[in-house]
Image (cartoon, grey):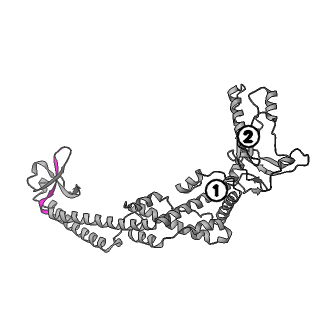
Amino acid sequence: EHASFSAGRELALALRPSSDAKEVRARLQVTDEAKALLSVQPGVGIGGARDVRPLLKNAEIGATLDAQALLDVQATLVSGKTLRRAILQNADSHPLLSDLARQIEECPKLVAEIARCINDKGEVMDSASPALARIRRELAGARDRLLERLNRLVASPEYASSLQEALITQRSSRYVIPVRAEHKGRIPGIVHDQSASGATLFVEPLAIVELGNQWRQLQLDEQHEVERILAALTAMVAEAAPHIRTNVAALAEIDLALAKAQYSFEIRGIGPDLLEGAEAPPAARDSDAVRYPEYLRLLRARHPLLPAESVVPIDVSLGGDFSILVVTGPNTGGKTVALKTVGLLAAMAQTGLHIPAGEGSALRVFSGIYADIGDEQSIEQSLSTFSSHMGNIVSILSQARADALVLLDELGAGTDPTEGAALAQS
């Protein structure tokens, strides 16, 4: 929701937690830097950038880009230049964002050439080429001569009774006058159309056909010159395509970082500390003196999808004297929400997102996050439900390493309480 263009949105949708501590640390740092940047420059963003990669592909295979497509390329380059300079103003404060910003190529020659040839309305301007300026001057003169001749004709008393109306219109890109069908012989010319009733014929008088031909030829000359100019600009885009493609990728990464920062503001999030330390050796597990490393410490943690004003924060810790935590309590007491909060916050942190928790919260980078959490609230638990949960747990046990986070809800549910307790213990 906070991404500003489609390429950034694609990256957001593709985000997955990483189990590489170095990568997780870098992801969180980028979010920290983006949040700090927005704090001092609230308006910073990717501006009018577009995901122009499909346009680049068309340009590279020789398809001519239209004026609006070229303006999109120009806007993307200008936005990249503006964002690059905004970030690099204080490069020391956000080194990772600055590394992304340095990937942006400004391509000043291409930006200036598009600006010289195409205006903000997507029109190719006279300044695009001397030939286009000359053709348009001649085109305006030819049109004036044509209309002057037609105006004299429709104003003539000789033809007044033959005209349906004293006006000039266009049919099939030719100037015509509306002639009464019964008077068509009075004004010699070419019939280009007729009214629905057939009472009016739209005639191009023979007296102006040559002028009309000149005007039409100049229109075609203008169209060909515009196409030539667009093709030349497209060739410049194709030449710069590798740089522009790199720009879009860098802008998408920066857009994602800014989106994560804006989301952090929305949820009042913090960047969690990352816990380190070796796993306790298996041989020492039976000793009363064993000390497990700290796995997680969540302070005033809130479920990210529940309204901040109504959710009840929780404190959860795991490690030290124990590596397994059993959560008990009455129905609707919040046990499942607590499990989901822990799992979601761990996944968010390993994705590089800030978490909705208090300062001092910390998490280990888990090798995997496994969950068997059902929302089955029915009093009658069927054998199939029990079998499904057991199947999930067997799968988790076969995959989970010692440094994984495993979340099991209603362990042993769906069978006899005594048997369920025995299965849970084993």
Tell me how many marks there are. Answer: 2
For label 2, count other residues whose C-alpha is less than 10 Å away and answer few (under 14), some (14-19) or many (20+): few
Secondary element at image label 2: helix
Residue that badge 1 annotates: 260
In primary-sequence order, the first of circles 1 and 2 is 1
* Residue furthest to the left: 185
Amino acid type, callout 1: Lys
Q: Position of residue 330 (x, y in %)?
A: 80, 34
Question: Does 204 appear in magenta?
Answer: yes
Q: Pinpoint residue 108: horizontal percent, then vertical percent.
A: 48, 72
Q: Is residue 338 left or right of residue 34?
A: right
x and y percentages locating residue 334 in the rendered image: 76, 39
Q: Which residues are magenta?
A: 196-207
- Residue 158 visible (yes or no): yes
The residue depicted at 78 percent of the width and 56 percent of the height is: 276
Give 228 or 150, whichever is nearer the viewer: 228
**Dot 2 amino acid type:** Leu
Q: Nearer the viewer, residue 342 or 246?
A: 246
Look at the picture and state if 188 lies above or below 125. above
| Above/below status of 198 relative to 37 | above
| Residue 121 coordinates in the image, percent (x, y) | 40, 63
Q: Considering depth in this image, is 196 or 27 the residue closer to the camera?
A: 27
Question: Which mark's residue is nearer the viewer, 1 or 2?
Answer: 2
> Quick check: can you spot residue 118?
no
Residue 397 circle label:
2
